[in-house]
């Protein structure tokens, strides 16, 4: 017994000293940014970052800002403050009940002055909806369903998944080498070229080609889910798709008709999701009244 | 006396292990709130910003109960944080320094404002005026609460 206690004491002391020493090398103020630590960060960044899921929240925000700017270079804004306000409140309501209520810069919505039926979600929560699409929404339930579909694209990072894998690898290689310092002009030029390429990949999906069809069906499913969680009747999405179905022959090849699966295919899947619900919220008159009030003119 | 030492030492080892085994998180969104309950519309305990460190207390569905370095306890949605090793023994004496180091690391990494500025300089025909205006449109939690309440949505719904 006499010999064990000092031994245990010494062992305990060693364990504690070791733990404390390792602790002090963890993120401790400015010490984190020593040259040695930067090399470690660089190596880690190169090894760890591989896929779209490794893009940070802040990077997603900056990618989203530029994708939004590209969309706005093709469409005019419908500068109607009360309408934009209403769309932002409905959109933020469904975002609050989504799987990703918190994103770096929050969710922002803007109405585009176009007769085309279209809605687009840039990464980082920049969401656009055309006047043409709004015209097909006859109540708040339908509007909420469309906005929840777009929030679903953001929540599941479908935009970021459009970036070509080879481009991401190039980006992470550059970023890995240059973590935690200001870029030199040459590095910045290389990085900007990769950035532009990534924006092109995303904008191409959003505006020209559309996402993979499975992402659209997934976003419809999320619209039903987020809408229900908010208290909206998911029949709003089904009704909106019925309206689209009626317009399909006229507008085929434009906007949502070009970039989304056929409305009847979407409708069939959405109807199945709705029929699986035991109870559905009522479409309250108060919501219809305020929708009409905000859509006057 | 000697009999007492063993449990005491083991206790100390356990305490240190708990501290080091503790799950810690870092706020990854620009700004958010530590809330009094696991609901979006619960009242704010304290405002949080990117880089703030948090210590896990408990979990409830998509919400986590956490403790700040200043000792406040509250709830935050899991989408606002990421798991991150944090030196919690340094809490209380250097929170500000710690946050600033994290902020530097966050700001300097990857596609950032510097890259956006470089892209803007290269593409002068692409305007960011409306992007900036759009980013400024703010819907407060109070606005949302009123909207949901009036529209019989969220916690104020129920008519099926």
Image (cartoon, rainbow, N blue to C red):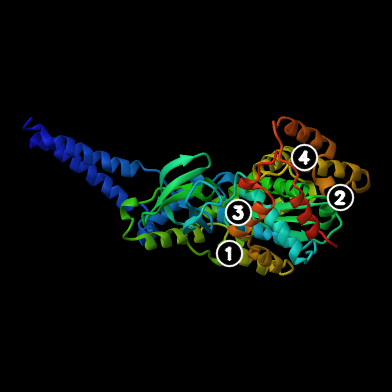
Question: Label 4: chain?
Answer: A
Q: First in sequence, mark 4 or 2: give its number.
A: 4
Of B80 and A137, the residue lying toward us: A137
Question: Label 3: chain?
Answer: A
Is residue A21 found left or right of A105 in the rendered image?
left
Measure how far apart labels 3 and 2 are at the Cα level. 28 Å
Q: In this figure, which residue is indicated by the disc labeled 1?
A: B113
Residue at the spot x=80%, y=33% of the render? Answer: A268
Q: First in sequence, mark 4 or 3: give its number.
A: 3
Question: Label 2: chain?
Answer: A
Q: Are marks 1 and 3 on the same chain?
A: no
Q: In this figure, which residue is indicated by the disc labeled 4?
A: A235
Q: Looking at the picture, how far across and down is residue A128, in whole percent?
A: 74, 56
Q: In this figure, which residue is indicated by the disc labeled 2?
A: A254
Confirm whether residue A166 shows in the render. Answer: no
Measure how far apart labels 1 and 3 are at the Cα level. 12 Å
Q: Quarter-wise, where is residue A261 in the image?
A: top right
């Amino acid at each position: 017994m006499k010999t064990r206690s000092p031994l245990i004491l010494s062992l305990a002391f060693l364990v504690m000293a070791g733990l404390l020493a390792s602790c002090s090398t963890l993120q401790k103020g400015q010490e984190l940014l020593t040259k040695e630590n930067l090399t470690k960060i660089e190596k880690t960044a190169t090894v760890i970052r591989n896929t779209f899921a490794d893009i940070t929240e802040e990077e997603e925000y900056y990618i989203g800002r530029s994708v939004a700017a590209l969309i706005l270079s093709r469409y005019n804004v419908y500068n109607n403050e009360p309408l934009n306000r209403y769309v932002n409140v409905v959109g933020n309501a469904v975002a609050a009940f989504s799987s990703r209520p918190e994103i770096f810069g929050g969710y922002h919505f803007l109405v585009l002055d176009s007769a085309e039926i279209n809605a687009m979600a840039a990464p980082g929560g920049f969401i656009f909806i055309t006047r043409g699409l709004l015209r097909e929404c006859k109540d708040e339930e339908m509007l909420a369903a469309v906005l929840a579909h777009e929030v679903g694209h953001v929540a599941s990072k479908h935009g970021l998944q459009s970036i070509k894998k080879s481009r991401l690898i190039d980006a992470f290689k550059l970023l890995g080498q240059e973590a935690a310092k200001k870029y030199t002009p040459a590095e910045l030029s290389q990085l900007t070229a990769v950035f532009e390429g990534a924006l092109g990949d995303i904008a191409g999906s959003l505006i020209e080609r559309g996402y993979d069809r499975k992402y659209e069906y997934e976003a419809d499913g999320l619209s039903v889910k987020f809408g229900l969680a908010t208290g909206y009747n998911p029949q709003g999405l089904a009704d909106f798709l019925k309206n689209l179905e009626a317009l399909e022959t006229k507008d085929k090849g434009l906007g949502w008709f070009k970039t989304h699966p056929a409305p009847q295919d979407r409708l069939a899947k959405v109807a199945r999701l709705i029929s699986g619900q035991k109870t559905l919220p009522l479409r309250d008159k108060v919501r219809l009244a305020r929708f009409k009030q905000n859509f006057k003119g | 006396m000697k009999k007492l030492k063993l449990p005491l030492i083991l206790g100390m080892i356990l305490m240190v292990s708990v501290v080091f085994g503790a799950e810690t998180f870092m706020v990854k969104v620009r700004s958010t709130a530590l809330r009094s309950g696991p609901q979006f519309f619960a009242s704010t305990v304290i405002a949080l910003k990117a880089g703030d460190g948090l210590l896990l207390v408990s979990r409830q569905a998509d919400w986590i109960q956490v403790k700040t370095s200043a000792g406040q306890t509250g709830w935050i949605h899991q989408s606002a944080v990421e798991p991150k090793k944090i030196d919690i023994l340094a809490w209380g004496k250097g929170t500000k320094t710690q946050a600033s180091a994290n902020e530097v690391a966050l700001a300097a990494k990857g596609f950032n404002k510097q890259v956006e500025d470089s892209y803007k300089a290269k593409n002068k025909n692409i305007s960011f005026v409306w992007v900036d205006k759009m980013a400024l449109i703010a819907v407060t939690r109070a606005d949302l609460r009123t909207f949901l309440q009036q529209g019989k949505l969220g916690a104020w719904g129920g008519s099926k």
